[in-house]
Amino acid sequence: MFRKALIMMMAVMLALLLLAGCQSATVTTPISSATTASVTTDTTTAATSATTSDTAASSAAASVSAADALAENGEIEVVSVDNASESAAVVEGDAVAIALNGDSISADSAAVVIDGSTATITAAGVYSLSGTLTDGQIIVETEDEAVVTLVLNGVDITSSTSAPIAVMSAEEVAVVLADGATNTLTDAASYVYPSADVDEPNAALFSNADLTISGNGALTVNGNYNDAISSDDGLVIAGGTLVVNAVDDGIRGKDYLAIQGGTITVTSGGDGLKASEDTDATLGYVTISGGVIQVTAAGDAITAETDVITSDGQFTLVAGGGSGGVVAADASAKGIKGLVSVVIDGGTFAIDSADDAIHSNADITINGGTFSIATGDDAVHADTSLTVNGGVINVTTSYEGLESGIITLNAGDIRVVASDDGINVAGGVDSSGMMAGPGRGGRGQGGPGGMQNLDATTYTGSNFLYINGGTIVVDANGDGLDANGAIIMTGGMVVVNGPTNDGNGALDYDGGFNISGGTIVTAGSAGMLQSPDAASAQNSVLIYVGQAAAGTLIHIQNSAGEDVLTFAPTKSYAAVTLSSAELVSGETYTVYVGGSATGTANGGLYSDGAYTPGTELGSFTVSSAVTTLGMR
């Protein structure tokens, strides 16, 4: 709760600040050793940038687990249902049998009040429903404090005026899908209410109480009026095979939506999976810990007023028609959206969205998982902070790859293809990539060596890119790494296949770039060429090559003939920047262009092979933190 309140306060402060601002050598490639991730930045390195410690601390604070995020939310009310015992109750005759007979209903219990083709359940207990109801309704309306259990044992219920199943009042309700049973619920295209001030039920399977769906059977829900499945309290899905079709939202839990298992397929004209409570900071969240989930939504595939929290599951999410879709300016078609936070510990995600693939108005933390992302906007966007502690993130199509005011990359394998910036550090709310052109983040040309008088250790702004570990491979038509602030790098491996036009740069920052560990190699145009700061503890080199075609090798070796770099950029390039622990002060290095190489290429970077020399470009001796070879 405290974290959420703090996030909301920070968001308000950020908005106020923005308003104020609106004024043959063997290739052993030591780079591979830098891929070992370290989640905790070395304290010695941190001391070199003491002025940024407060920002670093706030960034670290955003790194939370799924369990941490759940602990700050309201408790999930899982209706205690033993599917085996409920099934046994049906077999042994302990459950109240409700038979659906086309246009009539029969039941031998005073707790079931029948009026034509409508049955009202008035007491807690176990009820087994079977048969077909061509035009009718099952209502639950009881003041009992015990659980009402509805065992769907092969039902097909249609209503021409309302919801097939409506829980109007109850303490808790469990819907159990009987083993091997196939069930279908279909509501009306328009509802008939008793008066103008009544608007419930409003979904094919509707509940005013906490609702749990479980079992090993199947359920198809057709929501022709509004939502398909909706609870005005909490909604838990623990099992079953669900096929959901809705003109608006597919599955909605107002207080929360908790998915623990099952196979769920949703097709919706609005949002797919949703939690909508927006007045209580501890509610309005979606949590998913398992299941196979496929959502095709015109709006957001998964959306929460507060948090989206996942720890496991298999997800196939399509939003807004996919990455080629067009979204209205006032619409949202995101893959995963948590307005307060998104926390992902694990799972397998295939996301194809017209809008951002993963989005938060505040913080995103990715601790694990495997992601395949295609998007018409940003792949991962957080207004305040984005932290990656692990996982495999593969962005095949995006406007911008990763975007946030503070980005911290501690571990993981991240691969980004972007039509504009690959990784963009920028404060404030999201700007749609579908309404802007490439290169919008670029600044003035820095000349040879870029803006090398900058020093990240003295930067006093609030936007940061921290790279502490992991493997990051970027292919960007705009800037590769674009920081409207400072870059601090202590570890990891970064490969940037940058832009070919001089209006963008493989590196683009305005608050400095301090590097003390790891390896970064970039290739691209020379018009805005930048390198790490001259105050950095680790050496760097800028190399102007004139113009080289895509795939042309650039090779650097030391005076002993040992490989430092063998790199085949995937696009044409005019300049290369390298920073590595292998660039030793006082050592002389020779640079070759062309030739051939064997071994394994990772983003164009070769290892474990041999290089056959091409044309010698020249040599340089490292005499300062930034060395330049050649001229533009």
Image (tube, rainbow, N blue to C red):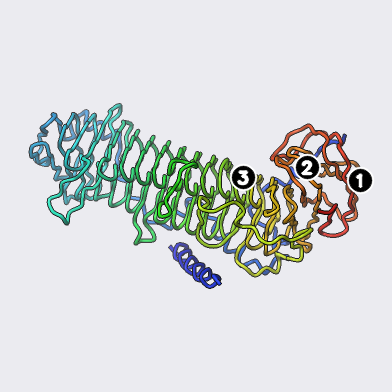
* Type of amino acid under label 1: Ser
Relative horizontal placement of residue 432, taking residue 417 as reference (left or right) = left
Q: Earlier in the sequence, mark 1 or mark 3?
A: 3
- Spot occupied by residue 430 in the image (x, y as percentages of width and height): 50, 57
Residue 42 percent across, percent down from the top left: 70, 58
Distance, label 1 to label 3, CA atoms, is: 33 Å
Q: Secondary structure at mark 2?
A: strand
Residue corresponding to mark 1: 559
Identified by mark 3, the residue type is Ile
Counting labels gives 3
Q: Which residue is mark 2?
A: 548
Q: Is residue 23 above or below residue 618?
A: below
Residue behind mark 3 = 414
Q: Which is in the foreground here, disc 2 or disc 3?
A: 2
Labels 2 & 3 near each other (Cβ < 8 A): no
Label 1's element?
loop
Q: In which quadrant of the rendered view does residue 133 lie?
A: top left
